[in-house]
Amino acid sequence: MIHAVDIKNLSKIINNTVILDDISLSIEKGSIAGIIGRSGAGKTTLLRCLSGLEAASSGTIHLLGQDIASKNKKNTVPIQQKIGVIFQQFNLLSRRTVFENVAFPLEIRGFSQTLIQERVTHILDLVGLTGKECAYPRELSGGQCQRVAIARALVVDTEVLLCDEFTSALDPETTLDILELLKNINKHLGVTVILITHDMTVVKEICDTVFVLEKGQCVEKGSMSTLLLHPIHETTQSLIGSLFKRELPHSYEERLVHEPLEGSQIIVRLLFSNSAAKEPIIASLVEKFHLPINIISGHLDHVREAVFGQLLMSFPYTQTIFDDVQSYLNHYHVKTECVGYIRD
Ligand SMILES: Nc1ncnc2c1ncn2[C@@H]1O[C@H](COP(=O)(O)OP(=O)(O)OP(=O)(O)O)[C@@H](O)[C@H]1O
Ligand SMILES: [Mg+2]
């Protein structure tokens, strides 16, 4: 099978510093993949290698079956034309209208006016910008600017769309709109979408597969659901943890201390997924330990086929009881953590 992207043992060394360290990964044609990692992990550098802006120090990159890391540049030109890139800053031409911005890549390639008119009109309709043809970038919202950038990236026969932190400048609601648009484009045009981001909420919405980068290495890869339910690497666990952790209500936060006091209540956070979400765990906890449990807040998140739950609760503290509760819940694969203590 020909992959959209096939990277083998890719390394990038700049000024004797290893920026990308022996990365191997493949991305299926027609899928939506996420490349996620903390700031400085090497995401943008990887994208620059993929888009041909940066040469690899070693290893191979195949895009749509063609070797782009090879020295023979003649081969790489047609394949680069099948790649569209969008960035956080939109990079629109301020003196050109929406229509002219989108038409730009076609003009460069010498398309006829009739064909340009036809293609640009069609793509503007697809991204929901019909009626805005004559507007200038300064007259558009951030979300609309990003739609123009997407249209411009897709107007040529794009097969792979690379997106680098492209929702960072948008508010959460606009981000969701744009992600929905990408999902549609992926579905209707069959374009492979590669999202590079540090934001797990973006990835969780639309990605089929996810690759986690840390210090230039790909430390974990898998389907979105597998990673959500069974993250193995510490970086993945912390990125996913940040998705589902909710804050303690303010009235509790005010009274919170970090050492147990005489007669204090311990506040415990329970984190659980799929199977455990279906068990009557709290009922059996009360029954088994005769604990007067006070539930502070609870929440269930549904992401694809996965269910994630979080429960904040308190009960009278003794170290023995907490240890017993913890090992009991462990048995059900429920993670427990002590948030702190409050005086009863
Ligand atoms: N041209 C360069 N010369 C020297 N170091 C570089 C160069 N480009 C990138 N780096 C270094 O490589 C590392 C990875 O940078 P990169 O921009 O790829 O990270 P990133 O994952 O995109 O981070 P962010 O989430 O902040 O955008 C950083 O430590 C950066 O300082
Ligand atoms: Mg970056």
Image (cartoon, helix red, strand yellow):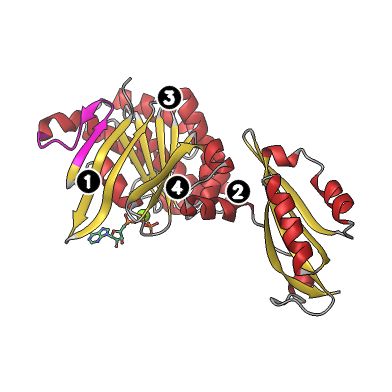
The magenta segment: 59-72
Percent x, y for residue 305?
63, 33
Tell me the residue that label 2 is attached to.
Answer: 173
Q: Is residue 135 left or right of residue 22?
A: right
Q: Quadrant for the C terminus, please.
A: bottom right
Tell me the residue that label 1 is attached to.
Answer: 53
Kindly tell me whether residue 46 is visible in this rendering.
yes
Residue 201 inside the magenta-drawn segment:
no
Characterize the local packing of mark 2: few (<14), some (14-19) or many (20 or more) Cα atoms within 10 angstroms.
Answer: few
Tell me the residue that label 4 is attached to.
Answer: 145
Residue that appears at 74% across and 75% down? 256
| The one of 109 and 95 positioned closer to us in this rendering | 109
Q: How far apart are marks 4 and 2 (CA)?
A: 15 Å
Do residues under tags 3 and 1 come within 8 Å of each other at their CB atoms?
no
| Residue type (three-letter) at the residue carrying disc 1 | Leu
First reached walking from the N terminus: tag 2 or tag 3: 2
